Amino acid sequence: MLSVDFTFLFVLLNLIILYIAVKKLFFGRIGAILDKRADAARQEMQAGGESRARGEAYEKQRRDELAATGEECRRIAETSKRNADMASEQILEHARFDAAAILESAREQAERERSEAKRRLDEEAADLIIMAASKVIEANMDSARNRELVDEFIGSRGAA
């Protein structure tokens, strides 16, 4: 059967004593170190989770701000376009008003010049009639000769 010799028992007893001594001296310390490391790892994982949550919240906040900024840019662009359209319309209206004023001024100037030309023409016609009448009176001739003289005088003035 099994034979147990003294060396085997001595080695077994030494192992048991060594195990108890190591357990008393080192396993408590090693366990405490392992527990500290496990706690530190849990804390780091928790801090990492919190940092990740803050990062995600920050990213969402930035996305919302970017969307709001984009909307504000569109609103500013629309406002600028409306202002530019209104300014353009005002400039066109002013130009139309100025053009109408210039056109009216040109019409009035043309009417004054036409009236002046008609007045001068009437004065010249009156002068011609007076000259013709004075020639007729000077010549004191018969009516056929007077008629001929007036026609000749008007013909010479019309050619001049």
Image (cartoon, rainbow, N blue to C red):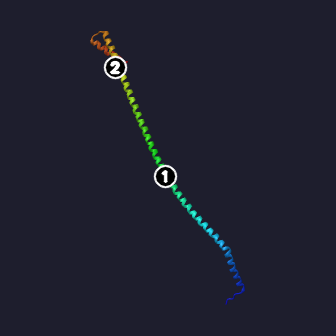
Q: Check the picture and name the quadrant holding the C terminus.
A: top left
Residue at (33, 17) in percent of width and height:
126
Q: Position of residue 90 (x, y in %)?
A: 43, 38
Nearest the eye: 53 or 25: 25
Residue at (60, 67) in percent of width and height:
39
Circles 1, 2 touching at the beta carbon (< 8 Å): no
Is 158 displayed left or right of 32 in the figure? left
Residue at (57, 64) in percent of width and height:
46
Seen as rendered, the residue at the extreme bottom is: 1
The 10 Å Cα crowd at callout 2, few under 14, some 14 to 19, many 20 or more, is: few
Nearest the eye: 59 or 136: 59
The 10 Å Cα crowd at callout 1, few under 14, some 14 to 19, many 20 or more, is: few
Q: Measure how far apart labels 1 and 2 are at the Cα level.
A: 80 Å
Image quadrant of residue 49?
bottom right
Amino acid tagged 2: Asp
Q: Position of residue 104 (x, y in %)?
A: 38, 30
Q: Position of residue 145 (x, y in %)?
A: 29, 12
Q: Secondary structure at mark 1?
A: helix
Query: Taking 72 as reference, is 39 above or below it?
Result: below
Mark closest to the chain's N terminus, 1 or 2: 1
Q: Which dot marks residue 68?
A: 1
Query: Taking 89 as reference, is 72 above or below it?
Result: below
Q: Secondary structure at mark 2?
A: helix
Q: Position of residue 72 (x, y in %)?
A: 48, 49
Nearest the eye: 45 or 21: 21
* Circle 1 or circle 2, nearest the eye: 1
Query: Taking 9 as reference, is 134 above or below it?
Result: above
Q: Check the picture and name the quadrant holding the N terminus.
A: bottom right
State the residue position of label 2. Answer: 122
Amino acid tagged 1: Ala
Residue at (35, 21) in percent of width and height:
119
Q: Which dot marks residue 144?
A: none
